Image (spheres, rainbow, N blue to C red):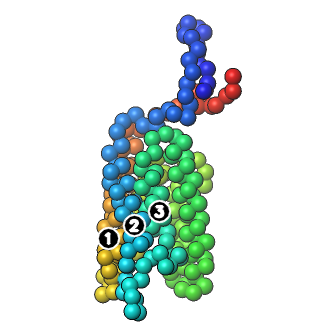
Amino acid sequence: MQTVGDPELGMGAVDVPVRRIRLQTGRRRHRVVTGTAGLLLFTCLFLPAIKGCGAPIVPLEMPPFWAPYLYGLVFAIAALARTQLGIAAGAIVLRALAWLVIVGGVALSMLAPPLGVAEVVLGIVLLASIGWAGSSEKRLAITAVVMGCGSALWFGLWALTPDALVGVYLAFASALGLMLGGIAWLADVAFQPSLVVPPAIARHRRP
């Protein structure tokens, strides 16, 4: 809580709940698309993806390829964020995931150089999208578009193979949904910009 007032205008002291200030000035239409697509993408982590020797392969058994599914979960939660604190938390997690993709790509390049290099490049692009520091809805939306495009390309290539199963097809559709949700999110931010909180109010001080 912070006391705010303007003696020249005769205004009295008012307690402002800094942490509960709403982030947006209008309705965010992307939430249903982004949240649903992200949740479905994460669910695909537990579904059979491709045919294996004797049994289908589930992505849960292959940690190096978890990144798209984990991003789906994060965006499913971030789509619900309604405060600056929620957006900041989402940005921190997305930044950590980008570094995880880079590290995983470096490790994978020792076994499969082409895939490893591609994963490192994707991680760098994702890190550039979310930024080194700070947070904003626009950066989260851009990251959703980038991840959605990258995932759709990855799962789309797998969907063209005869070994593809339901998990790959559903993941491909979810990735496209995440990309579209990110685009809608950018449109929301452009036409209904985030609430700008004055520094004097946003700064938390003890009485």
Q: For residue 28, what is the image quadrant? A: top left
| Residue ID at (50%, 79%) | 62
Few, some or many residues within 10 Å of mark 1 (<14, 14–19, 20+): many
- The reply to whether discs 2 and 3 touch (Cβ–Cβ < 8 Å) is no
Q: Inspect this view and state whether residue 157 appears.
A: no
Q: Is residue 119 above or below residue 189?
A: below
- The reply to whether discs 2 and 1 touch (Cβ–Cβ < 8 Å) is yes
**Residue 111, percent across and down?**
57, 87
**Residue 177, percent across and down?**
33, 61
Few, some or many residues within 10 Å of mark 2 (<14, 14–19, 20+): some
Few, some or many residues within 10 Å of mark 3 (<14, 14–19, 20+): many
Relative placement, left or right, of 70 versus 162 is right
Q: Is residue 37 above or below residue 61?
A: above
Secondary structure under tag 1 reads: helix
| Residue ID at (53%, 55%) | 130
| Residue ID at (59%, 19%) | 4
Task: Give the residue pinned by disc 2.
Answer: 43
The residues tagged by marks 2 and 1 sit, at their Cα atoms, a distance apart of 9 Å
The residues tagged by marks 2 and 3 sit, at their Cα atoms, a distance apart of 12 Å
Task: Give the residue pinned by disc 3.
Answer: 71
Tell me how many marks there are. Answer: 3
Looking at the image, tell me whether mark 2 or mark 3 is earlier in sequence order.
2
| Amino acid type, mark 1 | Leu
In the rendered image, which quarter contains the N terminus?
top right
Looking at the image, tell me whether mark 2 or mark 1 is earlier in sequence order.
2
**Residue 88, percent across and down?**
55, 46
Task: Give the residue pinned by disc 1.
Answer: 170
| Amino acid type, mark 2 | Thr
In the rendered image, which quarter contains the C terminus?
top right
